[in-house]
Image (spheres, grey):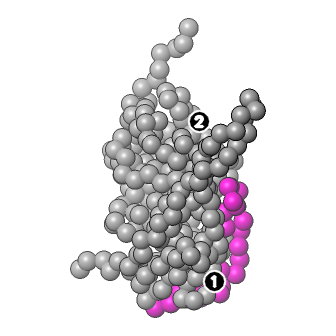
């Protein structure tokens, strides 16, 4: 039986805007900046949270946010998500309500990140229920050559960052094949949008690789694990708690990954290295 998918609106908004700036030479010129905007999420007419977002795929962002906050169990729990930029709101309609809504949203943890991420409930709860594929599963491993190819694909990817800066990018790969790429003002939004995309398209994370331009904090590691993705690659570094969780959950964490440079922080058993020759 086919999964019952929610109806999503198709709200669109400009991702950048042109502004006049004064440069170091005293010249006025036009440049692009990201068009950050507020999106207040209502679930069954009850206000949940306000997200600061670029607005590239707001419906998927909201869907992934509900998933990663563990407020809904399956994509079929959602009847519809309607975004209206005129009032900067997203209306979520569930099929049967959210059990213990007040209890689940009573405790908030404000996490590190651009615009500050917010996690409902206990940040560390339910970790024991997360299951990732074993390290000896061929599809859940990464070779050094594939890592280089992945980084090469990201270097060539057209992006808002290249034209306007000030945003984070996240991507989902199957080995070196790019499946989807999302940018937002914060990495939390970008990973939530990818989670929403995976849910809507029935994509399993077991043989996937998650890439982010942002640092690997505890929240980013937990969200990746919730998506079932065993390998994370970051252009930035990792925090102590992010590393501890990566080790605990059995994820391979790669940081400082640009061009042919990287550091593998954890999950060495998932990595098939082909070391570079020593540099003279």
Closer mark to the observer between disc 2 and disc 1: 1
**The one of 167 and 44 positioned closer to us in this rendering:** 167
Q: Residue at x 64, y 52 (%)?
A: 217
What quarter of the picture does the N terminus occupy? bottom left
In the picture, the disc for residue 256 is 2
Seen from this angle, which residue lies furthest top? Answer: 280
Q: Does 36 appear above or below 86?
A: above
* The stretch drawn in magenta includes residue 16: no
Residue 190 in picture, x, y percent from top left: 53, 57
Magenta highlight on residue 118:
yes
On-image quarter of the C terminus: top right
Mark 2 and mark 1: Cα distance apart in space: 38 Å
**Label 2 secondary element:** strand
Q: Earlier along the polypeptide chain: callout 2 or callout 1?
A: 1
- The secondary structure type at the circle numbered 1 is strand
Residue of label 1:
47
Q: Which residues are magenta?
A: 96-120
The answer to whether residue 147 is visible is no
Q: Residues within 10 Å of mark 1 (few under 14, many from 20)?
A: some
Q: Nearer the viewer, residue 76 or 103?
A: 76
Q: Quadrant of residue 196?
A: bottom left
Q: Looking at the image, do the residues carrying marks 2 and 1 touch, with CB atoms under 8 Å apart?
A: no
| Front-most of residues 47 and 273 | 47
Q: Is residue 49 visible?
A: yes
The residue closer to the viewer here, 86 or 115, is 86
Q: Where residue 60 sits in the image (x, y, percent)?
A: 46, 67
Return the x and y of residue 174 as percentages of the image width and height: 35, 48
């Amino acid at each position: 039986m086919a999964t019952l998918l929610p109806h999503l609106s198709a709200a669109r908004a400009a991702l950048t805007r042109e502004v006049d700036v004064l440069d170091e030479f005293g010249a006025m010129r036009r440049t692009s900046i990201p068009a950050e905007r507020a999106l207040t999420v209502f679930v069954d007419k009850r206000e949940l949270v306000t997200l600061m977002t670029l607005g590239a795929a707001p419906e998927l962002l909201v869907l992934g946010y509900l998933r990663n906050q563990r407020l809904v169990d399956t994509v079929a729990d959602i009847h519809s998500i309607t975004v209206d930029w005129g009032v900067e709101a997203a209306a979520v309609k569930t099929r049967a309500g959210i059990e213990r809504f007040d209890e689940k949203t009573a405790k908030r943890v404000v996490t590190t990140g651009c615009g500050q991420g917010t996690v409902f409930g206990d940040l560390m709860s339910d970790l024991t229920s997360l299951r990732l594929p074993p390290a000896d599963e061929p599809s859940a491993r990464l070779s050094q050559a594939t890592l280089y190819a992945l980084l090469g694909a990201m270097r060539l990817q057209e992006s808002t960052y290249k034209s306007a800066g000030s945003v984070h990018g996240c991507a989902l790969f199957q080995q070196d094949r790019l499946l989807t790429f999302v940018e937002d003002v914060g990495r939390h939004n970008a990973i939530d949008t990818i989670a929403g995309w995976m849910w809507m398209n029935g994509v399993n994370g077991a043989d996937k690789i998650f890439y982010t331009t942002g640092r690997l904090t505890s929240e980013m590691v937990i969200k990746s694990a919730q998506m079932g993705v065993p390998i994370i690659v970051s252009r930035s570094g990792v925090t102590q708690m992010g590393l501890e969780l990566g080790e605990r959950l059995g994820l391979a964490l790669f940081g400082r990954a640009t061009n042919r440079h990287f550091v593998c922080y954890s999950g060495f058993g998932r990595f098939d290295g082909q070391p570079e020759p020593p540099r003279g």
